[in-house]
Amino acid sequence: MDTTTAHQQMNPFDKLLDKLCLTPAGLLGLILLFALPYIPPFNQEYMLRWLIYCGFIAAMSVGFDLTAGYISIVNFGYAAVSGFGGYTSALLVINLGLSPWIAMAAGGMTAGVLGLMIGMISLRLRGIFAACLSWFFGLAIMGLATKMVWLTRGPSGLRTPRLFETDSNVPFYFLIIILLYLIYLACKWVVRSKMGLAFQAIGQNMDAARTSGINPVYYRVFNFTMSCAIAGVLGGYYAHFYGILTPDIMHTGKTVEVLAIAYIGGRGSLWGGAVIAFPFIFIMEIIRSSLSNLPGLNLIIYALVLILVMIYYPGGFSYFYDTNIRKVKNKALRYFFNGRA
Amino acid sequence: MIVLETENLTKKFGGLTAVNNVSMTVNEGDIVGLIGPNGAGKTTLINAISGLNPPTSGWVKMFGHKTTGLPPEKMCQRGLSRTFQIPSPFPKMTAIESVMTATIFGNKSGKVHDPVQHSRQMLEFVEFPMKETVVAEQLNTVQLKRLDLARALASNPKLLFMDEMASGLSEGELNDIMRIIDKISKKGISILMIEHIMQLIMAVCNRLLCIQFGTKIAEGLTKEVANDPKVTKAYLG
């Protein structure tokens, strides 16, 4: 939460940026992302598909970081919750003929309800125990999706209608970038309010938080619900983009991918994972496609990078950015990286 | 006026009775010292009262209302605050943010108009020696204890529990903490403090409560309790 009181003498542009939770550098990055599909070599369709996957993981890592970075509970079932939202959305479209857009929102809501349940059940658990519980939840949901063949068609995959009736990937790309930004904005607004302070207090020291008057039940459940609802919406996007849904989307490996990105990006920053996802996942996809005779190599690289970051630089990219880049001496650059000086 | 009253308070962990039938009172304006040998159950007693570890049996009354087993966040809003033996603010937060947490959530809505200003005053009040933007994990124990005290005071309590505020302090720091305790008391806050340093206890406490093996062995005015043969025996064996 902001403790400075120098808000008054800002010009309207800075005020707007502040409301939008962006720095000038962030705004430039966002514009660059929107321009990317027109810049060669990224204007090729297969590259766009990679970029869309980058955006998907980036958005997932923002939602994941809301729980992992603020209330310090690692939701190992995050991909499963996302898949749950995706299946809900897909089944609503297929069986009830709903529009994919509405179904996506419905998927988010049901995933939110699932998050509410996980949050309630894991309330008395701390740290690793809550993580395990959410993981088991995820495994159970994945098991259900695999076994309930009459509903989900199991591993052979569920065909789902796509969001846009076009072969081009460009509209999908724009949509995921908009989703990514909206999710970031929503999370940022929440953590900037009083609620963010409560999240951090609960995550860092439960006893001190409680004796300071914070009711952990409300804030933890709220946090879980919000983060899972985000995963659900993204699951819906995933389903209606790829056009086919298999239980693989719920695999723990997917959670680990999101977790690695969120941690390398920097826990508790929200934006760190979103920024890191684009170069990192992109390189991963290149490695995966050029070394297709070595499946699983990308997971080994994730593990290695994650271990190195956890040991030598636990703050991740956002910490590096905050301590080195934000503190430049040059005034113009300083404004560029920090927004209002 | 009686601020805090307990009757037959008992806390059992399985077969172990950590606090056994303790009845005690804290009056308005009191500075009560809670003394006893290591492992006597002092911290367990205040955990039981403040709700972190609810009692097995017996009751607690605060300001005339029964509060037995209420969670700590409710106790905080009713005017009970506490510091921790191992000072434990929020490691990644700055000093001012830690205090603001208690300012915002400890006060029932609307009582504090400017949380930042209020938190700053609290840090000044406990004579916090560092800048308010310092991150808590960079502080040493003495500074952390001050910060924890500021956090505890930020919720405007009427009753304050202090768990070994002065352990490990040097002579000069001891004088500082005595002065601060005096200031807190002058604000009209009643204090219950766990302490081992007799010098401090004799100087600031007006009443003492001594427990051993979870059982109360003496309660009364400081001089009387300190000279009680049972208390001397408990300490010296």
Image (cartoon, coloured by chain):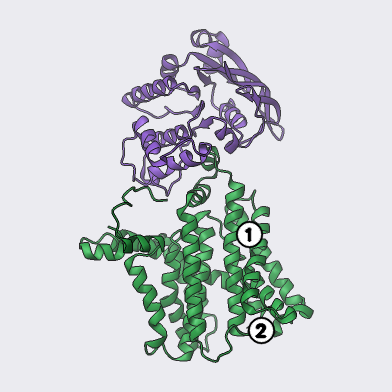
Residue at (48, 90) in percent of width and height: A46
Residue at (45, 34) in percent of width and height: B154
* Residue A45 locus on image (x, y percent): 48, 90
Q: Which mark is residue A132?
A: 1
For residue A341, which quarter of the picture? bottom left
* Residue A113 locus on image (x, y percent): 67, 61
> Chain in purple?
B
| Above or below, comparing residue A90 to residue A76 in the picture | below
Q: Which mark is residue A160?
A: 2
Q: Nearer the viewer, residue A220 or B167?
A: A220
**Three-letter residue code for mark 2:** Thr
User: Of callouts 2 and 1, which one flags the residue occurring earlier in the amino acid sequence?
Assistant: 1
Horizontally, residue A111 falls left or right of residue B183, namely: right
* Residue A171 locus on image (x, y percent): 50, 84
The mark closer to the camera, 2 or 1, is 2
Helix, strand or loop status at disc 1: helix
Circle 2 Cα neighbour tier, 10 Å, few/some/many (<14 / 14–19 / ≥20): many
Asked whether disc 2 touches disc 1, contact meaning CB atoms under 8 Å apart, the reply is no
- Which residue is outermost to the front? A12
**Host chain of mark 2:** A
Q: From where the camera sits, is residue A265 visible?
A: no
Residue at (51, 27) in percent of width and height: B161
**Host chain of mark 1:** A
| Above or below, comparing residue B125 to residue A291 in the picture | above
**Three-letter residue code for mark 1:** Cys
For residue B150, which quarter of the picture? top left
Residue at (65, 58) in percent of width and height: A116
> Chain in green?
A
Horizontally, residue A139 falls left or right of residue A325, namely: right
* Residue B170 locus on image (x, y percent): 34, 27
